Image: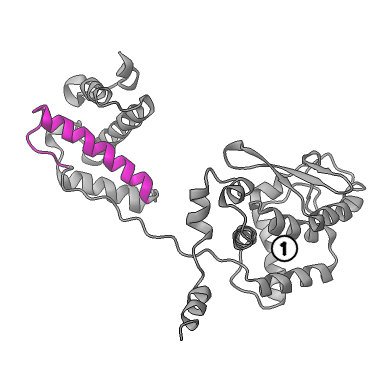
Amino acid sequence: MLMMEYNKGLTESNFYIDEFATYLMSIDKSDSTIKTYIEHVQAFAKWFEETNGINFDPIIVTEIDIRDMRSYLQGTRHLKETTINLRLASLKSYFEFLEGEKYIKNNPAKAIKKIKIQSPAAPKSLDEQTYRALRRHIYRGGNKAHIAMFEIFTRCGVRNFELINIRIADIDITERKGNLKVIGKQNKVRHIPLHRDVRDAINNWMEIRKNVKTECDNLFISERKTPYTRSGIWKIFKKYCAQIGITDVTIHSFRHYFCRTLLKNGVDISIVAQLAGHASGYVTAQVYTIPRQEELEAAIETLV
């Protein structure tokens, strides 16, 4: 049977796992959804036994148990609201099935509500004036590596770890064009065309980098001739920001600036999503179209 592989170590009379799996198949749930639901039930059963010190039996589960599990996932495990809500949905389906089949008298998950997902706050982003001031300050410092990093951050929109992992072989620059291969989350590869300022900055840095004797093939290396850490990169730009009085910027602000600038310039959101390495334009819209507080205030000031 399809679901027996998910039932290892469980007692059918206690859990009704096979019956639940058959029910899920009967309502056209996908194999992956069924697998997820079963795993969530198993995880709940394990948590129940470890917390209460007794064998799991759905007959004795109460609403309080499920509330306690929700608090545990939120307060101790610090799982995201969407992850917790998915687990709650699995348990709701499970106990609804048990109640419908008369395996239990009352559904302990019936009154359990989903965790309200907070609307994301506007991400910290550079405004144009701050961006230009910081860029000017970094260029005046004259460090070719730092200049190249800044240009890649703000004109390619890469994440901190993505910049750290750029290899020299990932860069292809000709006289008029350039391409950067980026390995993002879940090892997904994307290719980003290089703006002329990025090409110039990389070429200037490479004149120095090619003379550094090291087996490390990362584009950027620390003074110890090893790859940078995330905190190492942040320390570089935190210092630049502090020198000119910028206090509310992070490395991720550079990525925000890149995406918001493209969107403001009328670039299609699907293209911005692809350049940023997002799974869809929906993710990009959720994060980068949220107005900053000063933009909201400016909007009100336009009223007459």
Relative to 30, is 266 on the left or the right? Answer: right
Residue 55 vertical placement versus 268 (above, below) = above
Q: Where are the magenta residues, as a range?
A: 81-108
By secondary structure, the bulk of the magenta-drawn segment is best described as: helix
Q: What's the residue type where badge 1 is placed?
A: Ile
- Tell me where residue 233 appears, x and y as whole percent: 69, 57
68 or 224: nearer the viewer: 68
Residue 208 vertical placement versus 106 (above, below) = below
Q: Residue at x 61, y 57 (%)?
A: 259
Question: How many residues crowd mark 1 within 10 Å: few (<14), some (14–19), many (20+)?
Answer: few
Q: Residue at x 52, y 63 (%)?
A: 123
- Tell me where residue 91 appears, x and y as whole percent: 24, 37
Quadrant the N terminus occupies? top left
Classify residue 242 by image quadrant.
bottom right
- Tell me where residue 135 appears, x and y as whole percent: 75, 68
Magenta-drawn stretch contains 101: yes
Classify residue 107 by image quadrant.
top left
Judge whether residue 57 can be spotted in this image: no
Q: Residue at x 33, y 30 (%)?
A: 39
Magenta-drawn stretch contains 273: no
Q: Residue furthest bottom?
A: 304
Q: Residue at x 77, y 54 (%)?
A: 195
Relative to 71, is 212 on the left or the right? Answer: right
270 or 32: nearer the viewer: 270
- Tell me where residue 193 appears, x and y as whole percent: 74, 47
Residue marked by disc 1: 236
